[in-house]
Amino acid sequence: MNVLNNKRVLSIFLFLIGFYGFSQEIIKDKEPEKKAAQQSKRQRVDGIIATVGDYIVLDSDIDKAFLEIESSGASTKDITRCQMLGKILEDKLYAHQAIQDSIVVKDEEVKEKMNQQIDYMVEQLKSMDAVVKYFKKNNEDEFKTELFEILKQQKLASEMQKKIIDPIEITPEETRNFFKKIPESERPLLGAELEIAQIVITPKVSAAEKQAVIDRLKEIKKQVQEGASFTTKAVLYTEDPGSRSSGGFYKINKKTPFVKEFKDVAYSLQEGEISEPFETEFGFHIIYLEKIKGQDLELRHILMTPKVTPDALKEAKDKIELIKKRIQDKEITFAEAARTMSDEKETRANGGTLINPKTQDTHFELTKMDPELYGQVSNMKSGAISNVILDEDPKAGKRYKIIMVTNKIEDHVADFSKDYTKIKELALKEKQIDAIAKWSEKKIKETYIKINGEYKDCTFTNNWLKK
């Protein structure tokens, strides 16, 4: 069955899996442009190859885009330099128009994202110097300045695209008509799906372990009050990877998506004051409030998490093994055990059933599943219960769980009645793609765009050359 030779359906599927940016300019059944391919094989002299409104594109930007894709593990062998330039031009057009439409991206948001990325890079390459060297920059400041500008443009482009597609809705009639337009021989093949439930038992942290962390934070507070640097202490001791490199720094307001306990303490402080240790779901914190600017707070914090003892781990494992035996002995159903004994509040109420964070329904497609979860359930049959699994949750730390596959749906051709939710999503994405295409056509005509050098010979999907 030729499931996806229809380019329209292919574009929609690309959109769904998060590669919409390539769905317009990168279509893999095109012949690669020979001239650009030949150029990529020899040393290139960096220079301005395109201009979109107030933005320029350098030849090296294409190399960086290839590097970004390859570093994520994806293949670039079927992507030409012309196609990559088309994708970059789209992003520049979005960012340019976002500024024209007065879309505001706060520097603090970009800085927070930048710090998260830098923390990840340092973790992978072991040092900041290695990161700077890897990206061929002269120093850390130059690297951070360039990364900040890249992330800001990406955020502007994202907000502009969001502004275009957010108002778009799809009706049941439009969904039905969309499905009818797809020939039976080209209807998408949907991969095998699972519905999964789990029971989680979290080891209890002892009062002594909690008190040890509280005492350590109190000692740090005392040292700072006696003249030590809070920023240095945060770099050395905080267990929050998102703020470690910036010395625990955050800028927040009432709408910042931090847990309530954190914001309550932050807004109770005066400038220059350090809080007492307090607890959230992430562990124990102290906050140093640097500045109050209206409703915005500039603060630093240190997070420490109490450690679980071996005895607490053993007690949790014994408990979940007993729960599993009771289910297998049919004393209690899996759903009843989850509702009454699981420590995971997010799934406890609905009998342990997991919600797919990408689709917000209960179905997990095997080929798009989180690799760790895939390894745990891919070979399980419907109704089967896993062995006890030691899980490392970023928030909760070590915990034990058992998983049940409550339903397994094999590969099948899309069916309107059975797969309505997915078909509706496909129909909506097609409508969004059409809206993006019309918007792009209009804005390209209105915007100053210039393509230089051999890239004038490229064949683009969009009319960047304005022929």
Image (cartoon, helix red, strand yellow):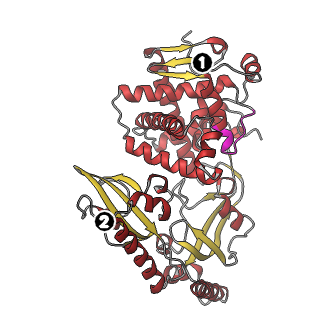
Mark 2 residue element: loop
Numbered label attached to residue 47: 1
User: What residue is rendered at 66% in x and 45% in y?
Assistant: 72
Can residue 420 be seen?
no
Q: Is residue 113 above or below residue 407?
A: above
Most common secondary structure along the magenta stretch: loop
Q: Earlier in the sequence, mark 2 or mark 1?
A: 1
Q: Is residue 279 magenta?
A: no
Report the Cα–Cα distance between label 2 and label 1: 50 Å
Q: Is residue 327 left or right of residue 160?
A: right
Looking at the image, which is closer to me, 305 or 378? 305
Please rate how many residues cluster around mark 2, counting C-alpha atoms within 10 Å: few if below 14, some from 14 to 19, many from 20.
many
Quadrant in which the C terminus appears: top right
Three-letter amino acid code of the residue under disc 1: Gly
Numbered label attached to residue 274: 2
Q: Is residue 286 left or right of residue 24?
A: left
Q: Position of residue 186 (x, y in %)?
A: 70, 38
